[in-house]
Image (cartoon, coloured by chain):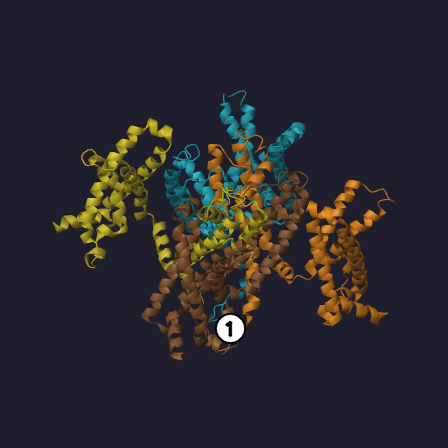
Chain colours: A yellow, B brown, C cyan, D orange
Amino acid sequence: MAPLRKRVYNLLEPSVSNSRASRVIELLLITLIFLNILAIVLESVKDVNAEYHHVFKLLENVSVLIFTIEYILRIWTSAENPKYRFKKRYYIFSGMAVIDFLSILPFYLELVVGFVPIDLLFLRIIRLFRLFRVLKIARYLKALNIMQAVLRERKEQIFVSIMFILFLLLVVSTLMFYAENEAQPTKFSSIPATMWWGIETLTTVGYGDLVPITTYGKILGGMISILGIGLFALPAGIFSSGLTEHLYKSNKKKFKHCPHCGEELDM
Amino acid sequence: MAPLRKRVYNLLEPSVSNSRASRVIELLLITLIFLNILAIVLESVKDVNAEYHHVFKLLENVSVLIFTIEYILRIWTSAENPKYRFKKRYYIFSGMAVIDFLSILPFYLELVVGFVPIDLLFLRIIRLFRLFRVLKIARYLKALNIMQAVLRERKEQIFVSIMFILFLLLVVSTLMFYAENEAQPTKFSSIPATMWWGIETLTTVGYGDLVPITTYGKILGGMISILGIGLFALPAGIFSSGLTEHLYKSNKKKFKHCPHCGEELDM
Amino acid sequence: MAPLRKRVYNLLEPSVSNSRASRVIELLLITLIFLNILAIVLESVKDVNAEYHHVFKLLENVSVLIFTIEYILRIWTSAENPKYRFKKRYYIFSGMAVIDFLSILPFYLELVVGFVPIDLLFLRIIRLFRLFRVLKIARYLKALNIMQAVLRERKEQIFVSIMFILFLLLVVSTLMFYAENEAQPTKFSSIPATMWWGIETLTTVGYGDLVPITTYGKILGGMISILGIGLFALPAGIFSSGLTEHLYKSNKKKFKHCPHCGEELDM
Amino acid sequence: MAPLRKRVYNLLEPSVSNSRASRVIELLLITLIFLNILAIVLESVKDVNAEYHHVFKLLENVSVLIFTIEYILRIWTSAENPKYRFKKRYYIFSGMAVIDFLSILPFYLELVVGFVPIDLLFLRIIRLFRLFRVLKIARYLKALNIMQAVLRERKEQIFVSIMFILFLLLVVSTLMFYAENEAQPTKFSSIPATMWWGIETLTTVGYGDLVPITTYGKILGGMISILGIGLFALPAGIFSSGLTEHLYKSNKKKFKHCPHCGEELDM
């Protein structure tokens, strides 16, 4: 049995086997995921959904069938993956396996809903799990692997800056609530409601649905804007700089030696 | 008496004593501060305040009691802190002690309001001092210490850039006031009122409550936007870069060697 | 014949011949392009178009005549350009030649419209090709050459970051659609419609035409803002940093020496 | 006479003489400028202007008197300034002297308006020249000198990026005009009008007074946003990075040598 499992594993992992058949399977799976994403997006457009409902239904059935087979085969063959064979980790609990499982779960729950009493609201929420199919593309997107690596490298810095932002948001929103609540009791109705203003302002989105109108509120808002603007871009900024560095490094690795004397350069 | 004071000091400063009891006390104090922050936020939501008013009242009383004890003990034991014992500085005037004091002050002022004639508006403002409890968390937030260090390092640069911004804001708002005042006399009613537009625009928040409508105003606004955009992010940008550097330094210390002699560099 | 072709080529390429006559021709062509850009902009203003329609018509005829001659001469003399003579590439398919062609095409199509049956809607779209005259200025704008060089240098990084952004946009818009669709069915009417909100928010433009109003939507929007803000500036940020580096390099070339052997470094 | 001129020159230039009297005069002048700025700002507030009109009038008269004396003395003593004595340059045409002149001009023009026939609209515009008094502070603001130095250092880069932005704005606004003009003929009424949208969007200000509503317009606007966002921050970004570098350099100059071997470091 081992040779068959090994063969299937190779078919599912083109990066290991490098065979042509595995590349074709990969391409088919990616195409299917893209079709599913397209279906999710188009189904949300009422007119399109009305006219092509049966097409979406067919795609749903075919997709679940193929994704289920893929899921079972991946679990079965995971024993071939050295990452899961030697270390005491289970593939079934890995991020991608969970996504694979959740993205087909709603279909089967809907099947049993006639036999088992399942709460309908619960089912409706479960149905949203179909959206996990969007995340299935993560397996194939090189960009996301890079993002993940950057996030891991910088996680401490990003955590510190998010802590700082949340503290700033709390202080700023509390102050603004006391400045504007009396003048606009329905808009700045509570501190949590004012936080929406705080996020909007400190990220510079500024929709304009919540705007201070009192003199105190405007002075406070102005000072907050001048001093706080850009701090909310800190986590993303740290992430961006990490990403740029990451992409730059792999690009310029060859220049890390002086072309004249061959010594390594610490730049 | 000295050994007792020393023992209490150690209980209040886990970073000094490293004992288990002090860690438990720290955790309790942090929990209490978080409960107070939560109460401040939730009390601002009308429905929640109506239903749980007695819970908030109870928390208030317990908190003030504990915070008062903490405040007194900290002042008493501050003599054990080498920072305040040898240098001629008083703990009672340090930032955190003032915050501790102001955050319990409203409770005691409200108690005496029946006996001593205190202006009610004054009391209402004093009541806002409860919000200083949010700042009590600063003692435990490592992130804020880093922020403070960065602010100290970069204070000159941040000061210069804020000066520049205020000058720019003044010039820009004066020009825009003369361009738009006639067409929108209630919106661009004065130079200070136009400064609100200036801050909104130069920080790119752009709520849309003040928008130039004359041709001159739009040309002026366009030029101001193209040339001035981003300058308001200067102080925050300097701060961000200082923070990133700070966080990066501790991360990558090992990579800094002088290329001439190979010794480590403290940068 | 060769000497004449060579002479015309030199007239059209001042960077090659450095002659005075060629500089005059270049200046005339640039002036004509600027007049055409001005005409396109001013024609769009109704009042101006009504009054000066015959001036625009005259400019159009003269411009097409000169641009046609220029186009024919450039193709004829391209054989003199070593870039196209030795390598098997055709000037006629180069970017600038295509722009030159498309920018005069509408004029000739309108001429034949009486004789050949051309669809009027098609003609109307073709007429927009006149706008390609704006791009003719690219030949003379040093800034655009730099931009192009930077884009080529960083194309991989920009591609990865755009991929990431599109994925983020898809996930974010899908979630927000399910949060807001019920409360605002006409505004958040479908996932593609919600993408407009996603772009507006994540770029921090925030017009305010689409704003979440439900509690879920606001919490989701707040989290998206805090975590995602600035990521949409990634491609432009990479481009900007590439440009700054590019401009900086040519400015500071003298300061780059290898610290080991002292030789100049080409970075 | 020379010794007197020298003495007066020293009084007006504290940086040269370092005398106490000159510092007092400098302080007085700065105070007067600040009072004038305050007056300009407060006069724009209708209520304040109505009540304190005579105070502003008095300040105006006193200010013009002192500023006129200052102006005359500065011109007279400019011969003592080595910058203007040896090189063939005239102080009277320097930036600060022109600002000094223009800021007192309106007062004298208003005086002669009874005797000489001056157009009233012209006079009204001239009266705005009073605003140049705000710029008089530039002589004393160290921050502005730094800004000027940075602008000079980076002027080429800033010029190239502004060229690029204007080209981008033209292309983007032309395209959006053709996409939205039909659906919103009063808002996107012409290409220049659409440029206001272009600036608002590409700077991410996003007031929301001009928003594309057609599908084409939204797709175009979305693509423009994703690709163009942040490019408008380029000139300011170059300026900011120049400023940060400038401020950083003077701050860390001492670290430019390796503390171990004393060799210079190229960082």
- Side of B77 relative to D94 (left or right): left
For this rendering, which residue is in front, B227 or A229?
Answer: A229
Q: Residue furthest left?
A: A1
Give x and y (percent) for residue A223.
56, 54
Is C159 rendered above or below residue B162? Answer: above
Left or right: residue D185 compared with residue A150:
right
Which residue lies at the image location 62% right of the left edge and 52% below the top edge? B169
Observer-nearest of C256 and B92? B92
Say which residue label 1 marks: B90
Residue that protrudes farthest toward the front in the picture: B115
For label 1, the SS is loop
- Residue A101 percent coordinates (x, y): 24, 44
In the picture as drawn, the residue positioned furthest to the right comes out as: D115
The subunit carrying tag 1 is B
Say which of B86 and B42 sits in front. B42
* Tally of marks: 1
Front residue of this view, candidates D146 and C38: D146
Q: Residue at x 17, y 48 (%)?
A: A76
Locate the N terminus of chain B by quadrant: bottom left
Quadrant housing residue C33: top right
Asked if residue B83 can be seen in this view, the reply is yes
Residue A84 position (above or below residue C57):
below
Question: What residue type is disc 1 on?
Answer: Tyr
Q: Is residue B258 visible?
A: no
Q: Position of residue D144 (x, y in %)?
A: 64, 59
Q: Picture coordinates of residue D221 (x, y %)?
A: 49, 39
Could you classify mark 1 by the number of other residues whose Cα lies within 10 Å: few (under 14), some (14-19), or many (20 or more)?
Answer: some
